[in-house]
Amino acid sequence: MKQDSITLAHGNGGQFMQDLIKKTIVPTLGGQETLTDGAVLQVGQETLVFSTDSFTVKPIFFPGGDIGSLAVNGTVNDVTAMGGTPLYLSCAAVIEEGFPIADLERILTSIGQACAASGVQVVTGDTKVVEKGSGDGIFLNTAGIGVRQFPLSSRFGTLKSGDHIVISGAVGDHGTAIALARNPLGLSNHVQSDCAGLYRMIEPVLKAGLEIVLMRDPTRGGLATVLNEFVDSRSVGIEIDQTAVPVHAGVKAVCEILGYDPLYLANEGKMVFVVSSEDSDSLVSMLRSHPFGQDAAVIGRVSERAPGKVLLRTEIGGSRILDMLVYDQLPRIC
């Protein structure tokens, strides 16, 4: 059914957003319909990676981060996912009249700290102020430029049956932290967002020349949605072992209370990989050597069993299709 107006579901990273991009944005603006985390541009002898992202998270301060660190780390991770070394960022802010200067300073400090942690610089920006009631505190936009310093696999972007699926850590932390920041539910459970820049963890992997086929940070729509994007319109599918997917106990507890599925919750400090079966153990070992990758695991494989689909082997031994997110469990998580 064709919709006549934008809904929150059009911004959740799931099926509605994919349809909006494919049916409205790309046909109108032109360009390639890649649906990746950034653009790869050849400029002279340099291969550049360019990405942009906007941030509307609510609340702007949450356990484990804030809108400032989220904006830096989100763009750093998008550039990293395209095989780039992130170098420079722009940062633009839309601020609502009446927003506390002290909160702005806190956010800017967080931006600086996140940049230092990932070795990037904010080199340009913009500030706009809207009337009170016309915004919701503060929104940020960041764009990032990086370079591909290390050669990628000749198979980058091409999946084949037998490839392994690797996640760099436990899923659902960020989405759960946002849910509890909005409604603590009287719980003593202190789930922290996993908000982090991942380039330092992934740089050794790129240097090692492992046969990485795809990388993506599973933010909006979570792990399930990214896996569906990996196999969309392809002749192969993906099979995931539910028992192999790491989920922290606190996240499981909150999901059971609220009825959420951690596979669809946002992550802001994780990377999911498609890697050759020969290199998957090496990848997991390298990720586990970094503090952000200690829960890294092989969680599934590419298969010809259900082309274009993601199958979940459940904890009780059955299997079901893991669809792309349609309606959001939790809007405005980034």
Image (tube, helix red, strand yellow):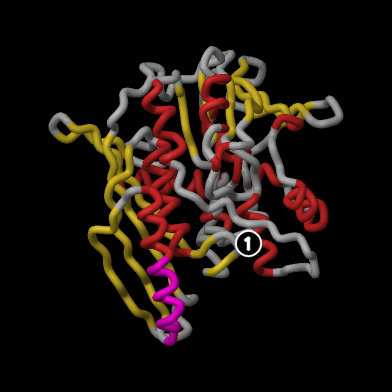
Residue stretch rendered in magenta on the structure: 98-109
Is residue 316 depicted above or below 133 in this figure?
Answer: above
Residue at image position (19%, 33%) is 46
**Position in image of residue 179 (x %, y %):** 67, 62
Q: Residue under label 1, please give it.
A: 178
Residue 52 in view of the camera: yes
Q: Residue furthest left?
A: 44
**Position in image of residue 174 (x %, y %):** 61, 54
Main SS category, magenta section: helix
Q: Provide the secondary structure element on which disc 1 rests.
A: helix
Residue 15 on the magenta segment: no
Left or right: 167 with respect to 81?
A: right
Residue at image position (13%, 32%) is 44
Residue type, numbered disc 1: Ile
Residue 31 in view of the camera: no
Crowding near pointer 1: few (<14 within 10 Å), some, many (20+)?
Answer: many
Left or right: 318 with respect to 215?
A: right
